[in-house]
């Protein structure tokens, strides 16, 4: 989904609003009923990834507070990713085992089996949805409270952040 920018407000204001919207949307996605948990987690993590990208672009304007909020959002996203990460590791080991012969292939097949068992165990555990949702509520408030400073209206500062990102 593109970020809407208009002539009625600055790019920094549009990005700040989108930042908050992405964090709130990630929280709402995690808590919605009727959608499979893995789909909700995937969608929420995508929103958090975009929010972190926006924070990197706004870092010249918001400084350390933006960096800190970005780390918090990354921690929340990682807390939700254990099942997906376990699946990827198991699938990768299985693919490598299929491409390898001899003792290395046997070791990789054993590793793939171990990782598949671990992935099933991780899937049996519920991710910390409620804790992540509570942390996202606080992060949305922190996004509103970011102090942009006197340089917020300067296009060169924002463009430098976007270029770096």
Image (tube, grey):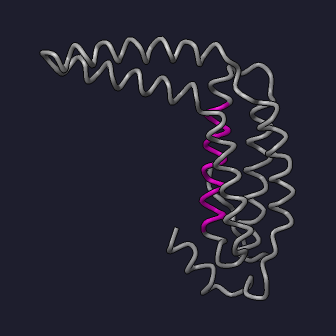
Residue 38: quadrant of the picture: top right
Q: In this view, does 164 lie above or below 28?
A: below
In magenta, the rendered stretch is 41-56
Is residue 42 rendered magenta in the image?
yes
Residue 57: quadrant of the picture: bottom right
> Viewer-proximal residue, 43 or 164?
164
- Report the residue at 60% width, 50% height from top: 49
**Residue 153 x, y percent position in the rendering:** 74, 85
**Residue 60 x, y percent position in the rendering:** 64, 78
- Report the residue at 68% width, 39% height from top: 44
- Report the residue at 79% width, 83% height from top: 149
Q: In this view, does 108 lie above or below 138?
A: above
> Viewer-proximal residue, 34 or 27?
27
**Residue 30 x, y percent position in the rendering:** 75, 32
- Report the residue at 78% width, 75% height from top: 9
Prevailing secondary structure class for the magenta stretch in the rendered image: helix
Q: Is residue 86 above or below residue 144?
A: above
Is residue 81 rendered magenta in the image?
no
**Residue 105 x, y percent position in the rendering:** 20, 17
**Residue sticking out furthest to the left:** 102
């Amino acid at each position: 989904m593109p970020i809407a920018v208009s002539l009625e407000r600055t790019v920094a204001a549009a990005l700040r609003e989108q930042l908050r919207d992405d964090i709130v949307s990630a929280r709402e996605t995690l808590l919605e009923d009727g959608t499979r948990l893995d789909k909700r987690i995937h969608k929420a993590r995508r929103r958090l990834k975009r929010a972190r990208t926006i924070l990197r672009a706004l870092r010249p304007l918001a400084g350390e507070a933006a960096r800190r909020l970005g780390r918090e959002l990354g921690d929340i996203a990682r807390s939700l990713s254990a099942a997906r990460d376990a699946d990827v590791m198991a699938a990768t080991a299985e693919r490598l085992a299929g491409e390898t012969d001899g003792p290395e292939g046997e070791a990789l097949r054993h590793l793939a089996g171990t990782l598949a068992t671990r992935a099933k165990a991780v899937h049996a555990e519920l991710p910390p949805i409620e804790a992540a949702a509570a942390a996202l509520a606080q992060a949305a408030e922190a996004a509103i409270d970011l102090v942009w400073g006197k340089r917020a209206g300067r296009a060169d500062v924002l463009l430098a952040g976007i270029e770096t990102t």
